[in-house]
Amino acid sequence: MSPLHQQDRTDRMTGGRCPSKATINEKTVVITGANTGIGKETARELARRGGRIIMGCRDTEKCEAAAKEIRGKTLNPHVYARRLDLASMKSIREFAERIKQEEPHVDILINNAGVMRCPQWKTEDGFDMQFGVNHLGHFLLTNLLLDKLKESAPSRVINLASLAHIVGKLDFEDLNWEKKKFDTKQAYCQSKLANVLFTRELAKRLQGTGVTVNAVHPGVVATELGRHTGLHQSQFSSSLLSPFFSLLVKSPEHGAQPSVYLAVSEELEGVTGRYYDVMTEKEPAPQALDDEAACRLWEVSSRLVGLEHEGQPSVSNPSAEGQNKAAQTNPAQTLGQNVGAAVSTVGL
C-alpha cells in the first residue's frame, strides 16, 4: 500500500488531522489533564502552533516532565506545568487564582481531564469521583476563569464529552450514588451527559460576551482513561481483542485533533453551544437537549461547589430563575433510552 493510500485509510479510521493551519501566537491556552494521552498531544500541537500553554495536572512531576518534553520538541519555551487536582475544590480554586494572578489573558480553556469507570471512589469533597472530576471540577474551574475569558474575548471553551452521553441519565435525587447501588458505567455516562448539558447552558449564559463553548467526543482513543474497564486484564481478552483494537482505536495524537480543531479553526469563530463527534457537528442525544435539565444541573452544581454563596456564577440566564422554579416543582427526567449494553466500555 502506498504512503498516500495508507494516509487516506488512517484518516478514514481516525477522522483525520485538524484541517486548519492557524497559529495561535500570543494566545494563552489552559489544558487540564495535559501530562498524558489526548491532553498531552493537544498541548504539544498547540505549542507547535505558537501558544502559551498552561498544563494543569494532578501529578506535578509527570506534568513537568511532559512540559519539558514538549518544550524540547516544539522549541516553544512557553509551556508550563501547574498543579491541578480536579478531585479537590481547594486545588481548583488555588489553580484558578494562580492563573488569574499570573496570566494577563486566557484565550482558550480545554477541559480535557477525566476519569472513566473507576471504582466507587469519592473526591476530597465527598462527590462521586466521576461526577466530581468530569463535571463538577470543570464546572467550578470554568466559572472561576470566566472573567478572564471574557476579558480576553474572542475566546473559547472546549469540553471533552463522549458518545457515552447517549445513555446517560441525570438522577437529581442521587447524583453522587449515595442511595442506589453503584454502577460505574452509568456513573460515567451520567458525567458525560452533564458535560453536554453544561456546554449548552453555559453557551446560553455567555451570549454576547465573545466567549464560545462547545463539546466534543474525540473518538475511541488508546489512553490511560480506560485503565479501569478491565478489558485487557486477562490474556484471553487481550489476544482476542487486540487485533480489533488496532483497527478501531486511534492514537492520542489523532485523538487530540478534534480538540485542536475546536480551539483554532477559523470557521468556528462565533460558533457556540454545539456538540461535535470528532470534527463533525452532530445533534446530541434527546436528554442532552433538555433545557430544563440543563438549567437545573447548573443551579445544583453551583450549590455543590459553593459558587452560590459567593455571588457566583458570574454569568446569568434571564430565564433561569423561572426555569429553576419549574424544575423544583416538576423534577427533570432524562429521556434517553435504556441501551447501556450498546455502549462500548473503552475510550468513550
Image (spheres, rainbow, N blue to C red):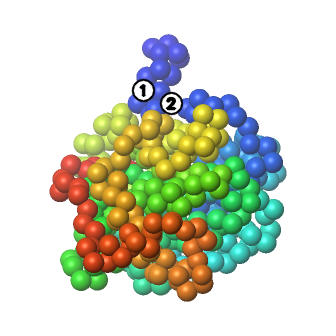
SS category of the residue bearing label 2: loop
In this image, 243 relative to 31: left or right? left
Q: Cβ–Cβ below 8 Å for labels 2 and 1?
A: yes
Residue 160 location (% of width, % of height): 48, 53
Question: What's the mark number on residue 12?
Answer: 1
| Of 243 and 315, the residue lying toward us | 315
Residue sitting farthest toward the top: 2
- Which residue is at 44% across, 46% downward? 275
- Which residue is at 59% across, 29% downward? 19
SS category of the residue bearing label 1: helix
Residue 39 location (% of width, % of height): 57, 53
Q: Is residue 6 above or below residue 197?
A: above
Q: Local crowd at mark 2 within 10 Å, few (<14), some, or many (≥20)?
A: some
Q: Which residue is mark 2?
A: 16
Residue 138 appears in the figure? yes
In this image, 91 relative to 274: left or right? right
- Which residue is at 66% across, 52% downward? 210
Q: Please, what is the three-letter code of the amino acid marked with disc 2? A: Gly
Q: Quadrant of residue 131?
A: bottom left
Q: Quadrant of residue 104?
A: bottom right
Residue 135 location (% of width, % of height): 45, 67
Residue 175 location (% of width, % of height): 33, 75
Q: Is residue 243 above or below residue 62?
A: above
Of the 4 image quadrants, the one containing the N terminus is: top left
The Cα atoms of the two marked residues, 2 and 1, are separated by 7 Å
Q: Local crowd at mark 1 within 10 Å, few (<14), some, or many (≥20)?
A: few
Q: Please, what is the three-letter code of the amino acid marked with disc 1? A: Arg
